[in-house]
């Protein structure tokens, strides 16, 4: 493999009025199963609007964000390069800002990396959008998510990654971690563009609630409290977020 280093993208948002960073969102872009090419600027650009929205909602409380720039574009089998890069990124946040909570937000392959890297002590929560969580040749591990709060969002018409696999993953995870919820975006595809406003609002609500102490909305609180399958097949209502408190 070429010798490369992961890095954090330019910081999104400014610290609180006193200049203190109190929490960080790390955004993990999507990518292909196999590729040793450089990171994809398009994949990173696709998540910048979400990163900006999350930070905008919490900047007054010291929330900032960084995109994680992978060494390689793909997952690459047992190498699982994005997982190592995500773990490095969490450690780098602690080095830069101190012992503060981190939320990992990933899309597709990046969501898989976020779920895998969540065992780092600083990680408080994970948002997994349209996650790639294959069950073969063996199921994805879940033990690293003990004590983390996890939100999974998947479009029911996703033709890239089977939403039923993320449901089965969430069901296994729920057996060992009650702080898990999964929302289904009916009629939406892999990129979740048809209901983008609602998906962004849901992610904002979860990040603000798990990192900054803002009260979770009623649908999210209900989904976390509900037993399977109810809390893992929660429909994302059209118009979600229009009346959220800020």
Image: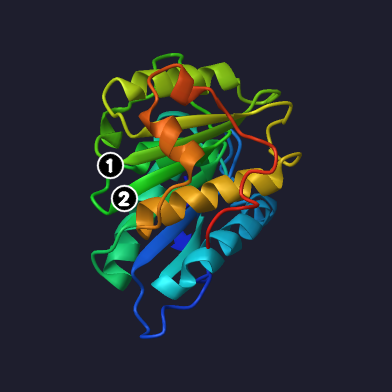
Q: State yes or no: discs 2 and 1 in contact (Cβ < 8 Å).
A: yes
Q: Secondary structure at mark 1?
A: loop
Vertical position of residue 153 compared to residue 59: above or below: above
Query: In the rendering, at what x and y percent does residue 227 appear?
Result: 37, 20
Query: In the rendering, at what x and y percent does residue 145 appear?
Result: 30, 35
**Pointer 1 local density, CA inside 10 Å: few below 14, some 14–19, many at least 20:** some
The Cα–Cα distance between marks 2 and 1, rounded to whole angstroms, is: 7 Å
Pick whichever, 219 or 183, lies toward us.
219
Residue 3 appears anywhere in the view: no
Query: In the rendering, at what x and y percent does residue 98 appear?
Result: 25, 69
Which label number is shown at residue 57?
Answer: none
Q: Give the colour scheme of this rendering.
A: rainbow
In the image: residue 114, left or right of residue 122: right
In the image: residue 89, left or right of residue 154: left
Vertical position of residue 50 compared to residue 119: above or below: below
Residue occupying the point 43% across, 21% down: 169
Query: Which residue is tagged 2?
Result: 123
Query: Which residue is tagged 1?
Result: 119
């Amino acid at each position: 493999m070429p010798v490369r280093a992961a890095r954090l993208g330019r910081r999104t948002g400014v610290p609180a009025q006193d200049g203190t960073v109190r929490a960080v969102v790390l955004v993990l872009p999507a990518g292909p199963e196999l590729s040793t090419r450089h990171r994809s600027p398009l994949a990173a650009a696709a998540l910048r609007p979400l990163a900006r929205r999350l930070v905008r909602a919490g900047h007054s409380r010291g929330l900032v964000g960084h995109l994680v720039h992978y060494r390689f574009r793909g997952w690459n089998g047992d190498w699982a390069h994005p997982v190592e890069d995500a773990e490095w990124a969490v450690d780098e946040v602690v080095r830069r800002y101190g012992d503060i909570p981190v939320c990992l937000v990933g899309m597709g392959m990046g969501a898989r990396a976020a779920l895998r890297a969540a065992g780092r002590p600083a990680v408080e929560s994970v948002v997994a959008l349209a996650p790639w969580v294959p069950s073969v040749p063996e199921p994805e591990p879940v033990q690293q998510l003990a004590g983390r709060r996890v939100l999974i969002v998947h479009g029911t018409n996703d033709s890239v990654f089977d939403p039923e696999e993320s449901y089965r993953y969430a069901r296994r995870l729920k057996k060992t971690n009650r702080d898990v919820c999964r929302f289904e975006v009916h009629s939406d595809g892999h990129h979740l563009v048809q209901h983008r406003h609602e998906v962004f609002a849901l992610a904002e609500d979860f990040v603000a609630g798990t990192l900054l102490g803002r009260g979770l909305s009623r649908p999210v609180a209900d989904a976390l409290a509900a037993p399977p399958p109810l809390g893992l097949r929660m429909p994302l209502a059209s118009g979600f977020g229009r009346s959220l408190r800020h």
